[in-house]
């Protein structure tokens, strides 16, 4: 082993070493042969479990470690380091830190500048020596007794055009103390620096060094660090280690020592250890013992590392003095991906330039491994945002307060100064423009009026010259409504499907019979045993809303369903034969239906997939005669739209043609015959035939189909044989039958098939 070390030292001494303008070492890699290359008595030192350089000599003596730098002829430079002597220094046990030396054997260098820690007696003080032609001259002495006992301190030596200072502090967060200052008579030349230890056998492990920096003077400016990636739920694993992590990035021009920086969440905080994060570099923060599988040179184990909330929380990164550097109030919705939000994928920051990074600047990683710890993000965007902002929605949150949510974080100053106008006279108001980090339930602008806002009245508001954080400008209009809490009689159960097809789902349709804009946030639906809050926030006057756990089924099985009139909804269990459906508002019953499958018409043998429709909104909900099977010609259900079965004002029925003639030649003029009907009762069985004037059958238009109370039929002029009917006079015979023998509807109409001239 000794032979190997000797050969290694000889090889390293003969091997050219890179000379850097800036040198760093936090011993994070626990190696003296990676990153900053060290030479000297390497076998007498180790990097311990705390990732610090520590003397580990076998016996008493002297040991030196050196490295190369590029301070020659530099008039402005700085040297920082943390030094610990775990004993009371003396003439036999002391340390030197060489700032400049012209030889790698620091003790034998004939030109050098060094700090000495330890002497005989009890008044030990740090001393600065300048060596010229092998002769040491004392330049300055620090406070007496300041290093007489064991100590661990952060030191910063600065040289600026002949003037030097030595400052110390007990921690990265503590205030600095000036221990030495003055002028150097001359600056020795040399490319080397390092640590010399003189010790007895009792203190052969008592010297420690960490957080080393040598290079140009570091500017005293706020660190430019960002949180760039979050792995809040590592399971199921996609390819990365099963560990939560937070990635940070140094966007500044200088290297940043992270020692003493604090990361906090809603439940606690943790302090980062020693680590030099270089400009343009990423670092991955993980818990103690969780770094396996990550890039070791870019991963930092943090004691008491915060536990990330899967659904969202606020994270803050502060420097050692408590200055906030970055804050991320993430939410699970930021993934914008319903699959990846379930775990195994990280959240990544898109743009490092975004002045107000929030939901619009984060999304799920696109990396197959589930994240990019220590690397540039997979969703990285280098270009600035040039899109103008817009109002996502406006919401009345109190009788006199309106909240505005924008498409992206806004410049709060522009919101405070922009012109605002309304199409109603609403009286005086005050505005509150919030910083993007202080948004209230998504809103960044609040308007508070002196008077209460009118209910159920759409109000248009206009904004002039609003800006996002990128200074993109826009003028915007929005509409807000003060919704009303539903009262009994305002909102009704209008249609119900309790026996869906095997691949389908139940649905319940609500109808707003009032002229009010109704607030559904406090509404729920139940069956007397289980109750579920309604997910749709509101409903307009005279409007329909179909609630179902599978809205795609409604669109496929009932193709005329308007998707904007449906909403995903967990429903209580609805039995196929009979059951109860109850509509609540703030716990009070708005409407209640106890249904039975016997309410279906006897003409339908299989009622699977057939809904029950309310015939009359004004009639009692629980009246069995107020419910009927949906018509066949609408697909046996009409979710989200007017019921196919209704009791209207015309009880005797009607049949008429939009035009008394038609010309099926595809020239855009009366190309088909439009037949409109209104039946005297719901769910009548209909037959419709076309005859010649002489009584010959031309076309069986409808053969025994169940119809709603009103609708339209179309004849395109085709015959039973697939040909087009010739010119002439024709007869439409329309018959409708009901299970009630007293209700029968029969009409005949004549019309002409002609050629347009």
Image (cartoon, grey):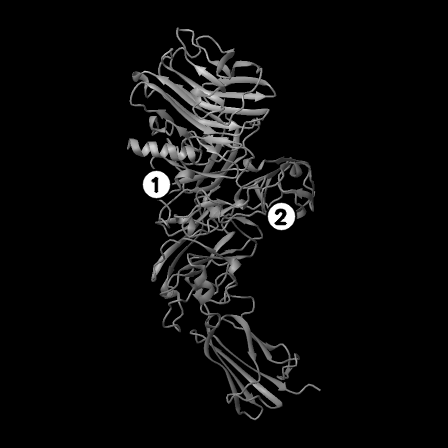
Mark 2 highlights which residue? 390
Residue at point 38% right, 19% down? Answer: 197
Asked whether, in this view, residue 104 is left or right of residue 575, the answer is: right
Q: Secondary structure at mark 2?
A: loop
State the CA–CA distance, disc 1 to disc 2.
Answer: 45 Å
Which one is nearer the viewer's eye here, 486 or 236? 236
How crowded is the residue under tag 2: few (<14 C-alpha within 10 Å), some, or many (20+)? Answer: many
Residue 205's place in the image compared with 400, above or below, is: above
State the image quarter where residue 504 is shown: bottom left
Farthest residue in the front direction?
133
How crowded is the residue under tag 1: few (<14 C-alpha within 10 Å), some, or many (20+)? Answer: few
Looking at the figure, which quarter contains the N terminus? top left
Which one is nearer the viewer's eye here, 601 or 31? 31
Which one is nearer the viewer's eye here, 124 or 220? 124
Q: Is residue 656 visible?
A: yes
Looking at the figure, which quarter contains the C terminus? bottom right
> Which label sits on residue 664?
none
**How many badges with numbers are in the image?**
2
State the image quarter where residue 181 is shown: top right
In percent of width and height, residue 440 lies at: 54, 38
Q: Is residue 259 visible?
A: no
Q: Nearer the viewer, mark 1 or mark 2?
A: 1
In percent of width and height, residue 186 lies at: 57, 17
Q: Secondary structure at mark 1?
A: loop
Label 1 close to label 2 by CB (< 8 Å): no
Residue at point 64% right, 84% down? Answer: 663
Mark 1 highlights which residue? 292
Q: Earlier in the sequence, mark 1 or mark 2?
A: 1
């Amino acid at each position: 082993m000794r032979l190997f070390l000797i050969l290694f030292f000889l090889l390293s001494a003969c091997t050219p070493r890179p000379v850097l303008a800036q040198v760093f070492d936090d011993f994070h890699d626990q190696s003296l042969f990676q990153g900053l290359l060290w030479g000297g008595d390497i076998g007498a030192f180790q990097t311990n479990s705390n990732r610090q350089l520590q003397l580990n000599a076998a016996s008493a003596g002297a040991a030196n470690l050196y490295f190369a730098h590029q301070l020659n002829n530099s008039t402005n430079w700085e040297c920082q380091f943390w030094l610990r002597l775990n004993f009371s220094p003396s003439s036999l046990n002391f340390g030197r830190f060489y700032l400049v030396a012209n030889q790698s054997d620091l003790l034998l260098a004939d030109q050098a500048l060094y700090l000495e820690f330890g002497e005989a007696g009890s008044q030990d003080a740090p001393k600065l020596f300048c060596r010229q032609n092998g002769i040491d001259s004392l330049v300055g002495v620090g406070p007496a007794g300041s290093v007489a006992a064991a100590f661990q301190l952060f030191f910063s030596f600065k040289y600026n055009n002949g003037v030097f200072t030595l400052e110390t502090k007990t921690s990265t967060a503590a205030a600095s103390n000036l221990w030495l200052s003055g002028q150097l008579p001359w600056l020795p030349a040399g490319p080397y620096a390092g640590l010399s230890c003189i010790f007895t056998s009792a203190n052969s492990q008592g010297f420690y060094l960490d957080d080393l920096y040598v290079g140009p003077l570091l500017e005293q400016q706020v660190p430019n660090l960002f949180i760039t990636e979050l792995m809040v739920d590592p399971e199921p694993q996609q390819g990365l280690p099963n560990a939560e992590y937070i990635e940070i990035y140094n966007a500044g021009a200088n290297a940043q020592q992270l020692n003493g920086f604090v990361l906090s969440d809603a439940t606690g905080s943790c302090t980062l250890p020693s680590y030099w994060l270089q400009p343009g570099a990423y670092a991955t923060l993980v818990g103690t013992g969780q770094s396996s599988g990550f890039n070791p040179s870019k991963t930092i184990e943090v004691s008491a590392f915060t536990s990330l909330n899967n659904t969202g929380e606020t994270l803050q990164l502060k420097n050692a003095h408590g200055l906030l550097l970055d804050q991320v109030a993430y939410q699970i919705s930021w993934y914008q991906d319903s699959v990846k939000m379930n775990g195994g994928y990280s959240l990544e920051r898109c743009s490092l330039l975004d002045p107000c990074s929030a939901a619009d600047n984060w999304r799920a990683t696109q990396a197959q491994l589930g994240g990019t710890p220590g690397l540039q993000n997979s969703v990285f965007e280098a270009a600035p945002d040039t899109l103008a902002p817009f109002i996502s929605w406006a919401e009345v949150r109190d009788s006199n307060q309106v909240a505005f949510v924008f498409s992206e974080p806004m410049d709060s100053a522009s919101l405070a100064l922009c012109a605002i106008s309304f199409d109603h006279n609403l009286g005086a108001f005050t505005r509150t423009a919030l910083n993007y980090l202080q948004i209230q339930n998504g809103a960044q602008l609040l308007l508070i009026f002196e008077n209460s806002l009118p209910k159920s009245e759409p109000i248009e508001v206009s904004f002039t010259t609003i800006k996002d954080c990128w200074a993109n400008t826009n003028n915007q209009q929005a509409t807000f409504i003060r919704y009303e809490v539903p009262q009994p009689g305002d909102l009704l159960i209008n249609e119900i499907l309790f026996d869906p097809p095997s691949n389908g789902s139940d649905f319940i349709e609500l109808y707003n019979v009032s002229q009010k804009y109704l607030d559904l946030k406090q509404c729920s639906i139940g069956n007397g045993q289980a109750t579920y809050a309604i997910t749709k926030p509101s409903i307009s006057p005279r409007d329909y809303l179909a609630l179902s756990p599978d809205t795609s089924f409604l669109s496929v099985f009932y193709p005329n369903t308007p998707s904007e009139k449906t909403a995903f909804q967990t429903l209580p269990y609805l039995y196929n034969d009979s059951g109860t459906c109850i509509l609540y508002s703030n716990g009070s019953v708005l409407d209640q239906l106890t249904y039975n499958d016997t309410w279906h018409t006897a003409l339908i043998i299989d009622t699977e997939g057939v809904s029950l429709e309310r015939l009359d909104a004004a009639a009692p909900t629980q009246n069995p005669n107020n419910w009927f099977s949906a018509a066949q010609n609408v697909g046996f259900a009409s979710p989200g739209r007017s019921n196919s079965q209704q009791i209207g004002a015309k009880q005797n029925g009607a049949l008429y043609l939009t035009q008394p003639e038609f010309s099926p030649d595809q020239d855009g003029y009366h190309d088909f015959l439009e037949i409109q009907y209104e039946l005297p009762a719901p769910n009548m069985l209909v037959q419709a035939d076309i005859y010649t004037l002489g009584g010959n059958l031309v076309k069986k238009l409808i053969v025994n189909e169940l119809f709603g109370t009103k609708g339209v039929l179309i004849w395109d002029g085709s015959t039973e044989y697939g040909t087009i009917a010739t010119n002439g006079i024709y007869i439409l015979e329309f018959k409708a039958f009901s299970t009630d023998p007293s209700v029968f509807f029969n009409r005949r109409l004549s019309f002409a098939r002609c050629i347009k001239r």
